[in-house]
Amino acid sequence: MRTVAETGSTNADMAALARSGLGEGVWLRAERQTAGRGRQGRNWASPPGNLYASTLVRLRPTDPSPATLGLVAAVALDEAVRVHARDVPLAIKWPNDLLLGGAKLSGILLERVEDAVVLGIGVNLAHHPDLADRPTTSLAEHGAVVDPGDFADTLAEAVARWLATWRGGGLAPIRARWLDRAHPPGTALAARLPDGSVLEGLFAGLDGDGALTLRLASGGTRVIHAADVFQV
């Protein structure tokens, strides 16, 4: 685990290292970021005390779809949080948000760089931002005091194990764990699609490729491959 006091973005740094030939498995953690990024280019608030870390996955010809690495990251992160904060009400929301008591605890950002995927993970350990469009929380708000360095080590071990499962067993065991840790079937969700439209439905699981399945009011189903998803 490489640790720096401050950087702009661990994902940006890891992307540069990927282009220079860095091998798989190295992690970079920053105590503070000045230009952290979330999905769809959103700013990611990065005060000291939280986790900001990135790693690199070098893709192999026999690997499952790179898009499913988000599911791998989600189940690994869920496992790591449960090690450091037992008996807290966690649930995964598609594709890879971790919710604590229904509020956003973390963010996962995957970025393709040539033959690699940079995997960035941010977790609200000590602090959480106030967002206009969704509730947020931190582990500290639920009584868990967690050192970012200790958490990063636990997370790196979990990611390595689940990455090996993904490569050795395909998507099926990842999908099974993800569904076991997700909010219950029938949870009301709203999906903001890339064209700006919003589709509401009930959570009906994942298809075989890891895409979100919604049961619509009409009785039909819709498979979602890309969207910003919210609990209703």
Image (cartoon, grey):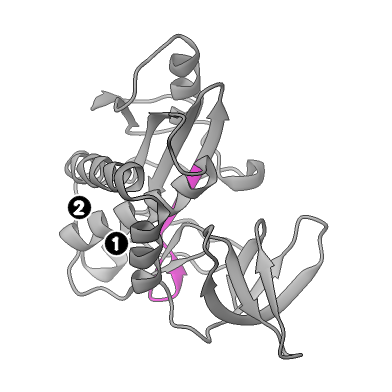
Identity of the residue drawn at 49% across and 31% down = 34
Q: Relative to 152, say whether 211 is above or below.
A: below
Looking at the picture, tell me which residue is in the foreground, 127 or 18. 18
Q: Is residue 78 left or right of residue 171?
A: left
Question: Which residue is at the far top?
Answer: 20
Q: Helix or strand or loop: what does disc 2 sit on?
A: loop
Is 159 included in the stretch rendered in magenta? Answer: no
- Asked if residue 217 lies left or right of residue 52, the reply is right
Q: Is residue 148 left or right of residue 204?
A: left
Q: Amino acid at mark 2?
A: Val
Residue at mark 2: 146
Q: Quadrant of residue 132?
A: bottom right
In three-dimensional space, the C-alpha distance between marks 1 and 2, rounded to whole angstroms, equals 8 Å
The answer to whether marks 1 and 2 mark residues whose Cβ atoms lie closer than 8 Å is yes
Residue 139, numbered circle: 1
Q: Is residue 23 above or below residue 136?
A: above
Residue 219: % across, % down? 71, 90
Q: How far across and down, in percent of the image, does residue 120 sit?
A: 44, 38
Query: What's the magenta region?
Result: 99-109
Few, some or many residues within 10 Å of mark 2 (<14, 14–19, 20+):
some
The residue sitting at 55% across, 79% down in the picture is 204
